[in-house]
Amino acid sequence: MDSETLRIGRSNNVFVLVALLAGLLPLAGINIAYFLSVDAELVPRCIPYLQGCTSISATGRHPPGSVVYRGTVIPSACFMLLYWYFASQWLAAHGNKSLRGRMLPWLGLCAAIFLVTFVAALGEVGDGYRTQRRLGMIGYVSSTFFAQLFFIGSIAKSKRSGELIFPAWVWRTKLALLAGMVILGLGSLFTPLFTSDLKAAEQIIEWNFFLLSASFFTVTGFAWYKDRIGADFSIRG
């Protein structure tokens, strides 16, 4: 484009779609990958959220589950990155230009890189790949959790100042999801006191933590749907 400008106007449609895809796409992909892996007799059959018979990563190590896993989780990393950029722009549109809000895109970038790093090592054998998977998952979970924490803090600040009217049920839901993630994180420290099957307990925590984290993205879409503020993005050639 020489002198043309590609513009996405002040519409919240793109915001809502990205929020929904950032949460629902990986959630659907991982669960579909699990059922495909069960059908191929690669992982045990159970309710992983309650019984923890397998890990999330195990569902994406081998075909056919790995095809769906990679085909949904890797694109979702891009949607998550866009989500955090949009979140920062949305806060700024409501007058919140705090450091926490400005950090969201950078935390989103870190989370996306770590997630792709993790997925790229799935199914590979060796200590180096095992370390890559571990660092990738730790980096992704940490970056995403702090971004969610900063987002909640920024929303709270804007609500107190009257710059932002946020749906009450969405606010309470996001707080509950964040609290649930904290409880699960702390619970992982005390599982040895309550069960001898530490592996299953850790995998139950893993599945439910991911469910809560993915839901955090999706719930935001309802707030953005009610809010007519979007952002202008221009690409000049």
Image (cartoon, rainbow, N blue to C red):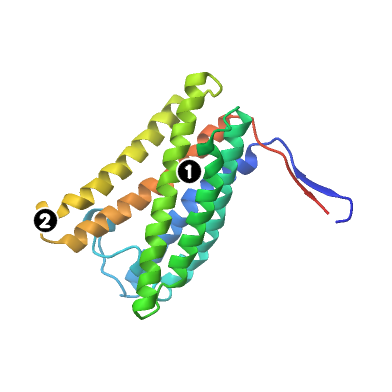
* Observer-nearest of 214 and 32: 214
Residue 116 visible, this angle:
yes
Give residue 195's mark.
Answer: 2
In the rendered image, the vertical position of residue 24 relative to residue 102, given as above or below: below
Looking at the rendered image, the quarter that the C terminus falls into is bottom right
Instruction: Please give the name of the residue rendered at 72% of the width and 39% of the height, measured from the top-left corner.
Output: 232
- Residue 187's spot in the image, x, y percent? 21, 48
Depth check, mark 2 against mark 1: the one in front is 2
206 lies left or right of 87: left
Residue receiving disc 1 = 218
Mark 1 lies on a secondary structure that is: helix
| Amino acid type, callout 2 | Thr
Picture residue at 47% right of the left edge, 44% below the top: 217
Q: CA distance from mark 2 to mark 1?
A: 33 Å
The picture quadrant where one finds residue 44 is bottom left
Q: Give x and y (percent) for residue 32.
A: 41, 62
Residue 76 visible, this orientation: no
Crowding near the residue tagged with mark 2, few <14, some 14–19, many ≥20 C-alpha atoms within 10 Å: few
Q: Is residue 117 left or right of residue 42?
A: right
In this view, which residue lies farthest toward the top? 162
Taking the view exactly as shown, the residue that stands out farthest to the right is 3
Could you tell whether 8 is left or right of 200 in the image? Answer: right
Could you tell me residue 50's position as x and y percent?
Answer: 23, 53
